[in-house]
Image (spheres, rainbow, N blue to C red):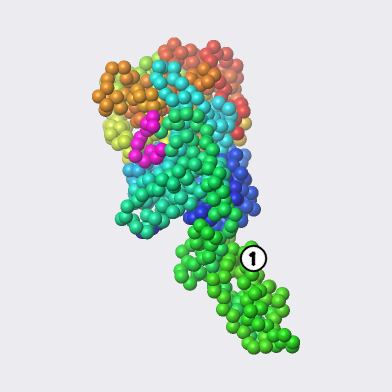
């Protein structure tokens, strides 16, 4: 049985060493750039290389997070940033940005690439998509059930799943809350955690004071089920936390994982003291078991203030003593040969057995080494005949056993020497130092690589004008329901309509079909796009069956599809769809390489919502669609505010309750401590929430600058607007299209979003 990897976090070198000493099979860290925990201690370049060597000496692995979205101006830094780590033997890179993925695959072909949880993989279609792009391992969305993880595992990709630590309320990678409200982007590792603040609903639904704050996860009680499911790596969250957390949590999970493998069929019982140990290490109020066996629920929400409680100081001292203050030693066997007239010889071999400090798990050699370990032979000065005082075996042993600050300790040392032999003490010390240095190098050498950088970067050098629009861009409009759709059909300037797939598959009858056919017939250049869900999971099989029928029927009226995730994109490809595909803003394209990546997959990119005017110009908007109006989606969540308040329609029907339960896909309003109101759409058809910004983005003042960038199209997204509001916005953007150089005044409230300042 292949053993599951225990993967620990480290935000500092002390945390890293503690995790290794406590028994982690692998550690993930962030360097000085491009990590999704910008406020962790993180590692200098020299420390990353040192950590790689340290991990490999003890038979462990080291993964580096490069899991932020990367701006165009930063892309050129990545090859030189990664090169020394790659050459040192870095075991893998965790990535979010598909442009970075493309670059690393080209520049560092032997590097293992892991898809971050921020890639928002929610099923086998997304996993298969990444597998075809050269990704060897995926960290699926934390919201998935164990059944869904098993389905992903069947694709052949490695699965790394979180088993302990803090939980985001939003699907990772889909949260713009922090950036839109304060300019600190979670996609850049600078999340200000607005989800931990108090909110209340403005609709009479009673929720806890912090309805967006999830309890921390602890899966210790059902580790056997996770192991038997075939998960490849168990991931502990917590690069922002203290070294005692990394070591202490790792030690507990190490013990129980090993206990399971010792007796897989035996009873698996978690001791109360171990539960208490975990509970005392940086836990927010209470713990829960995550989404493995539930879809959502009020019991997952922190009941009180979501800050960390105090830790047990006695336990912290124990952790420091066992894992942070001592370095475990790799056991070495050796033989010294001192023969007169010949160079002194020291044979060294690092075996599998080790002598370690109390409480520290043994480790030795390179991963996968056989019982013979790794050996070296070093020759020193010529052994002479003693003129006065010959060497004794005791004197030789005294000098050779001094391993000092090396990672080695003698297990067996055999000394064979001629009588009346002599060698200076300094020569013996030099022989010992050179031998242990050679042994360390021999262990590390198999990991090291050479790196020949490509002569040219085709994707980064590719012209951004490909697919550009020399004339005016098309005007696209996106609607959420039939009332909004009715309000936009009379606007002659609209070239493209985005219509929600749930309306199409569930509510659209013959009358609407006829109206849309008539709308298209009025202008042959018009197009209709079906909008796929923001989240696609196994539960959506029936929806996909109907969608396929709609798209592939002989008399279909649909010209294209708007996709919001890799699941939908790959599903369409597998189904043989040949129509146009528009990737939404949540399929991020922050740089030219990312744009080229989506183009190669057959999708047109949408400009990201977090980039500034200058950053978009640097990347180039030619050929892209730009959202110029609409409430930005701040969160997409599996947990449901209605469910938390006991008002979930599906749950009430299941419990036999009726009456005042609201219908699905209706809006409710979330209010913060400043009385700012955020609309929330409960998408019951796919069981997720969309939390939108309190005011819509509106770039009506920037027509001239946007048109100079030659975007393929501009889009208006309607969410909460009624008919009058929609007509007002359409009237404004008529002028935007016809007179881009002329400032447009608008009476409706709006925000420039991050268009002027961008996100950190």
Kindly give the residue lying farthest to the front in the view shown.
314
Q: Is residue 31 above or below residue 617?
A: below
Taking depth in this image into account, of 176 and 201 the one nearest to the observer is 201
Q: What residue would you read off at disc 1?
A: 404
- The residue that appears at 60% across and 34% down in the rendered structure is 760
Can the viewer see residue 378? yes
Q: Position of residue 415 (x, y in %)?
A: 59, 80
Which residue lies most toward the left here? 656
Residue at x 51%, y 57% (from the top left corner): 359
Image quadrant occupied by the N terminus: bottom left
Query: SS of the residue at dot 1?
Result: loop
Magenta residues? 288-299
Q: Main secondary structure of the magenta part?
A: loop
Horizontally, is 340 left or right of 601 in the view?
right
| Rendered residue at 72%/85% (across/down) | 389
Where residue 727 sits, quadrant-wise, is: top left
Near-viewer residue (29 or 116): 29
Membership of 9 in magenta stretch: no
């Amino acid at each position: 049985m292949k053993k599951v990897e225990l993967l620990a976090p480290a935000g500092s070198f002390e945390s890293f060493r503690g995790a290794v000493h406590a028994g982690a099979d692998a550690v993930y860290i962030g360097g000085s750039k491009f990590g999704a925990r910008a406020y962790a201690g993180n590692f200098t370049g020299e420390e990353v290389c040192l950590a790689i060597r340290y991990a490999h000496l003890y038979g462990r692995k080291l993964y580096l997070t490069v899991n932020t979205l990367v701006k165009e101006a930063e892309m050129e830094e990545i090859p030189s940033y990664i090169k020394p780590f790659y050459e040192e033997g870095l075991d893998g890179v965790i990535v979010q940005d598909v442009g970075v993925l493309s670059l690393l695959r080209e520049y560092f072909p032997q590097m293992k690439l892991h898809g971050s949880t921020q890639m928002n993989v929610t099923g086998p279609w997304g996993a298969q998509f990444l597998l075809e792009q050269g990704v060897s391992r995926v960290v699926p969305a934390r919201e998935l059930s164990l059944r869904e993880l098993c389905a992903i595992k069947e694709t052949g990709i490695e699965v790394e799943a979180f088993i302990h630590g803090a939980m985001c309320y939003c699907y990772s990678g889909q949260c713009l809350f922090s950036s839109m409200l304060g300019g600190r982007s979670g996609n850049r590792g600078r999340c200000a955690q607005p989800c931990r603040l108090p909110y209340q609903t403005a609709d009479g639904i009673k929720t806890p004071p912090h309805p967006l704050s999830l309890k921390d996860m602890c899966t210790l009680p059902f580790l056997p089920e996770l192991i038997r499911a075939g998960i490849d790596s168990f991931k502990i969250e917590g690069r922002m936390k203290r070294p005692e957390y990394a070591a202490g949590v790792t030690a507990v999970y190490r013990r129980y994982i090993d206990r399971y493998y010792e007796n897989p069929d035996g009873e698996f019982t978690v001791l109360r003291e171990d539960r208490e140990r975990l509970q005392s290490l940086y836990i927010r109020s209470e713990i829960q078991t995550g989404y493995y066996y539930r879809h959502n629920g009020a019991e997952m929400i922190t009941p009180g203030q979501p800050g960390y409680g105090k830790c047990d100081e006695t336990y912290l001292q124990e952790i420091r003593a066992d894992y942070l203050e001592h370095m475990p030693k790799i056991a070495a066997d050796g033989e010294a040969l001192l023969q007169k007239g010949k160079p002194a010889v020291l044979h060294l071999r690092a075996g599998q057995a080790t002598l370690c400090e109390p409480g520290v798990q043994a480790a030795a050699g390179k991963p996968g080494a056989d019982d013979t370990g790794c050996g070296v032979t070093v020759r020193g000065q010529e052994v002479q005949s003693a003129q006065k005082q010959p060497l004794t075996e005791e004197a030789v042993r005294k000098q050779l056993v001094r391993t000092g600050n090396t990672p080695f300790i003698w297990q067996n040392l055999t000394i064979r020497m001629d009588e009346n032999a002599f060698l200076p003490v300094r020569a013996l010390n030099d022989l010992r130092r050179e031998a242990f240095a050679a042994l360390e190098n021999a262990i590390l050498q198999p990991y090291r690589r050479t790196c020949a950088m490509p002569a040219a970067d085709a994707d980064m050098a590719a012209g951004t004008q490909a697919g550009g629009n020399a004339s005016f861009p098309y005007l696209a409009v996106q609607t959420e329901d039939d009332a909004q759709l009715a309000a936009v059909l009379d606007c002659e300037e609209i070239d493209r309509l985005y219509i929600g797939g749930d309306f199409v598959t569930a509510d659209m009858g013959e009358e609407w079909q006829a109206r849309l056919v008539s709308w298209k017939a009025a202008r042959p250049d018009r197009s209709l796009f079906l909008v796929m869900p923001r989240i696609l999971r196994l539960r959506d099989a029936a929806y996909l069956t109907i969608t396929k029928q709609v798209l592939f029927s002989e008399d279909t009226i649909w010209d294209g599809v708007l996709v919001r995730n890799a699941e939908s994109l790959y599903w369409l490809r597998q189904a043989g769809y040949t129509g146009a595909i528009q990737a939404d803003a949540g399929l991020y394209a922050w740089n030219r390489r990312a744009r080229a990546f989506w183009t190669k997959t057959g999708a047109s990119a949408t400009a990201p919502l977090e980039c500034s005017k200058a950053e978009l110009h640097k990347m180039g908007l030619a050929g892209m669609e730009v959202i110029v109006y609409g409430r930005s989606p701040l969160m997409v969540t599996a947990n449901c505010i209605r469910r938390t308040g006991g008002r979930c329609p599906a749950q009430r029907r299941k419990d036999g309750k009726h009456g005042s339960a609201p219908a699905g896909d209706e809006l409710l309003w979330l209010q913060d401590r400043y009385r700012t109101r955020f609309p929330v759409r409960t998408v019951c058809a796919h069981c997720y929430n969309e939390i939108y910004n309190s005011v819509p983005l509106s770039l009506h003042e920037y027509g001239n600058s946007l048109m100079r960038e030659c975007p393929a199209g501009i889009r208006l997204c309607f969410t909460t607007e009624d008919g009058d509001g929609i007509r007002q916005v359409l009237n404004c953007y008529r002028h935007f299209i016809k007179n881009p150089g002329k400032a447009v005044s608008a009476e409706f409230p709006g925000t420039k979003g991050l268009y002027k300042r961008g996100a950190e």
